[in-house]
Structures are given as C-alpha cells and as structure tokens.
Amino acid sequence: MTQALRGKRVAILATEGFEQVELTGPREALEKAGAQADIVSAESGTIRGWNHIEPADEFTVDHTFDSIRMDDYDAVLLPGGVVNSDTIRTNELAQELVRDAARANKPIAVICHGGWLLISAGLVQGKKITSWPSLVDDLKNAGAHWVDQEVVVDGQLISSRKPDDIPAFSQALVEQLARAG
C-alpha cells in the first residue's frame, strides 16, 4: 500500500441519493494512497447512497457544508447520482466550496451527473469535460467542450462518465493530488 497522499484531505461533497459506487470507489483509492476522505453534506447525520435506482447503504456525514473551509482540504470529489446532483447543484454553500477549490487551483474530481454542481457554480466555461451523456446539452450550453472519454483532465478538473470509469477516474485523481504537492 502506497502512502503517496499521506497528510492530504479530500472533501467528498454529497447529499442524499448519490451513486454509491461513485463515492466508495474513489474514496477507497484515496484512502489506500494515504489520504483522508471526508463526506461533507448539507446536514449532519447520515446520507443514503443508491445503486442506480435502488436505495443502498447509509453513510455517516463527517462535516456539513457550513462547517468546513476549502483551505483545510487539498481536493474535492463530486460523486454523481441524479437525486444527489439535482439537489446539491442548488445549494449555495456547495457552490461556494467548489468555487473556492477552483480559485485555489485544487483538484476537483467529478463523475457522472456530478457536473451539474459545476455548471451551477459557473465553473465549466471553456473547460474540456466528460459526464453521463444526458448532461451533454447542459455542459455545452454552459460553455464546456464535452467529449466522450473514460477520463478527462483539464487543469485541475478531472471528469469521468460513469461507474465503469471509476478505476481510471480514481487513478487520475490520486496522480493529480500527488503532483499537487
């Protein structure tokens, strides 16, 4: 087990209805590399993941959006899931957290429907990005250059399309975070 990310902290921004494997897969890769990965949500307690359209496991929220500062984190992870992504995109605190990460040039890793938060936060203009195919029009209308690839890295932005892409997505996130110092 490598410890390339020892001392690094990643904020996983999620709400009820996230795609479970899009949180657990990257989180496992981050933790194996030595990073601490905190689940950050709108409210304390627990949030439930989903396996596509079926309810799955509950996860303990480590912190709330209003209780953290991006200065305390080295990267952001945005899992997808339609319900989660549709809810989180309208949360002003979540929008501000990803804007803070972007201003500080910290890695922002987004998969599947997670890109909706970046659109609402005004962070995709001029960016090369991928996502679940149903977001193509939203991303293009927000000024992004959408491509159909397993993983896309554009500056600090790392994006993938779907659960099948998680191994490549996780590897890109770990590598980018290791390079970030």
Image: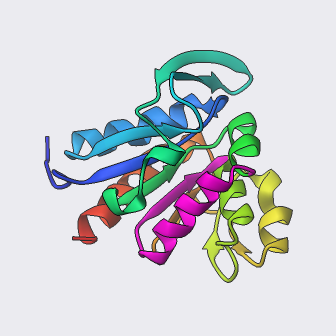
Q: In x, y percent, where is residue 82?
A: 74, 38
- Name the residue rendered at 40%, 32% in the picture: 62
As drawn, 105 above or below 114? below
Q: Is residue 148 visible?
A: no
Q: Specify whether 20 is left or right of 147.
A: left
Q: Quadrant of the N terminus?
A: top left
Q: Which region shows up in magenta?
A: 90-112
Q: Is residue 177 visible?
A: yes
Q: Magenta segment: does it hold 98?
A: yes
Q: Specify whether 30 is left or right of 145.
A: left
As drawn, 67 above or below 138? above
Quadrant position of residue 107: bottom left
- Name the residue rendered at 79%, 73% in the picture: 142
Q: In x, y percent, where is residue 116?
A: 72, 55
As drawn, 48 above or below 148? above
Quadrant position of residue 30: top left
